[in-house]
């Protein structure tokens, strides 16, 4: 029993040195050292190739995984960076870069979430709110003005029935004169001027027409490329 205890006491210091020695051995790999040199010379693509070769020589190289995680993150490959950071932590949980790797994993996950579900810009959202508020106020003013005009209009008087002429007052029949035909006044077309952020659907709803009718009245207009200041005929 005493011999076993002495053996364990001697084995503990040796075991504590193994992770550090393994890390140093990984960094002594010629491909790893060449990758470090290429990083210092700003040749990131070449450095990535060298670190990949270091992994081919030693698939358990935690140091190569950490360097590849940093390079993938720098290149915008956040999924690849997460993979290499996680492999680094699996191979060397007590690595001096463990805290950094965990922080970078959280940052890369946030970048992936932002790319899949981008948040609206607050300034654009506020401009849209202001535009809708101004448009709503203008519509209310127009509605109030119309109600005021209708209230001030006098009621129409009932016309008196025409009196029948007596026999002595019977009019002499005259030949009707040909009246020059005058064309009926053409109905003035309604025109809408495109504003910022307008769409065909929004314009049709605002003017009380169907989008299909609006497009039929403007056959040369591309609904996907409306321009601010462009005039549209409202049917």
Image (spheres, rainbow, N blue to C red):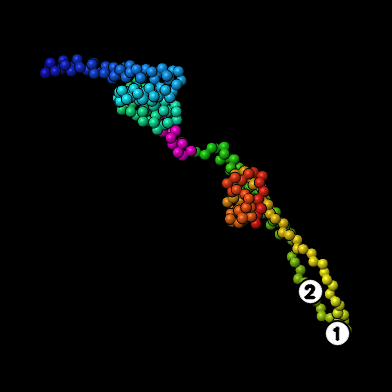
Residue visible at 61% across and 51% down? 203
Q: Residues within 10 Å of mark 2 (few under 14, many from 20)?
A: few
Q: Which residue is mark 1?
A: 167
Question: Residue reaching furthest bottom?
Answer: 167
Range covered by the magenta-colored residues: 107-118
Asked if 152 appears above or below 165 in the picture, the reply is above
Q: Residues within 10 Å of mark 1 (few under 14, many from 20)?
A: few
Q: How many marks?
A: 2
Percent coordinates x, y for residue 155 in the rendering: 74, 65
Q: Which image quarter is the C terminus in? A: bottom right
Question: Is residue 100 shown left or right of residue 160?
Answer: left
Residue visible at 61% across and 55% down? 216
Q: Which residue is mark 2?
A: 160
- Was residue 235 drawn as part of the magenta stretch in this picture? no
Percent coordinates x, y for residue 23 in the rendering: 31, 19
Q: Main secondary structure of the magenta part?
A: helix
Question: Residue reaching furthest left?
Answer: 1
Q: Quadrant of residue 105?
A: top left
Question: Is residue 44 shown left or right of residue 213?
Answer: left
- Was residue 109 drawn as part of the magenta stretch in this picture? yes
Instruction: Let me know if residue 206 appears in the view.
Output: no
Percent coordinates x, y for residue 141 in the rendering: 67, 51
Q: Residue 24, labelled with which disc?
A: none
Asked if 159 appears above or below 147 in the picture, the reply is below
- Which-is-in-front pick, marks 1 and 2? 1
Q: Quadrant of residue 15?
A: top left
Residue visible at 38% across and 22% down? 50
CA distance for labels 1 and 2: 22 Å
């Amino acid at each position: 029993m005493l011999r076993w205890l002495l053996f364990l006491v001697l084995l503990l210091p040796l075991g504590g040195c193994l992770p550090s020695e393994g890390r140093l051995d990984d960094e002594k790999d010629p491909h790893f050292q060449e990758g470090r040199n290429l990083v210092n010379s700003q040749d990131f693509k070449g450095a990535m190739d060298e670190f990949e070769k270091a992994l081919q020589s030693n698939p358990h190289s935690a140091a190569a995984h950490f360097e590849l995680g940093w390079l993938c993150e720098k290149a915008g490959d956040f999924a690849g960076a997460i993979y290499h950071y996680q492999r680094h932590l699996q191979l060397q949980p007590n690595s001096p870069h463990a805290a950094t790797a965990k922080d970078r994993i959280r940052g890369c996950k946030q970048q992936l979430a932002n790319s899949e579900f981008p948040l609206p810009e607050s300034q654009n959202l506020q401009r849209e709110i202001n535009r809708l508020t101004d448009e709503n106020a203008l519509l209310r003013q127009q509605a109030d003005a119309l109600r005021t005009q209708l209230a001030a209009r006098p009621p129409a008087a009932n016309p008196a029935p025409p009196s029948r002429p007596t026999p002595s007052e019977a009019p002499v029949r005259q030949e009707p004169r040909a009246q020059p035909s005058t064309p009926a006044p053409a109905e003035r077309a309604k025109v809408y001027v495109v504003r910022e952020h307008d769409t065909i659907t929004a314009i049709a709803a605002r003017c009380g027409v169907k989008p299909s009718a609006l497009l039929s009245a403007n056959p040369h207009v591309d609904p996907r490329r409306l321009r601010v200041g462009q005039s549209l005929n409202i049917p």
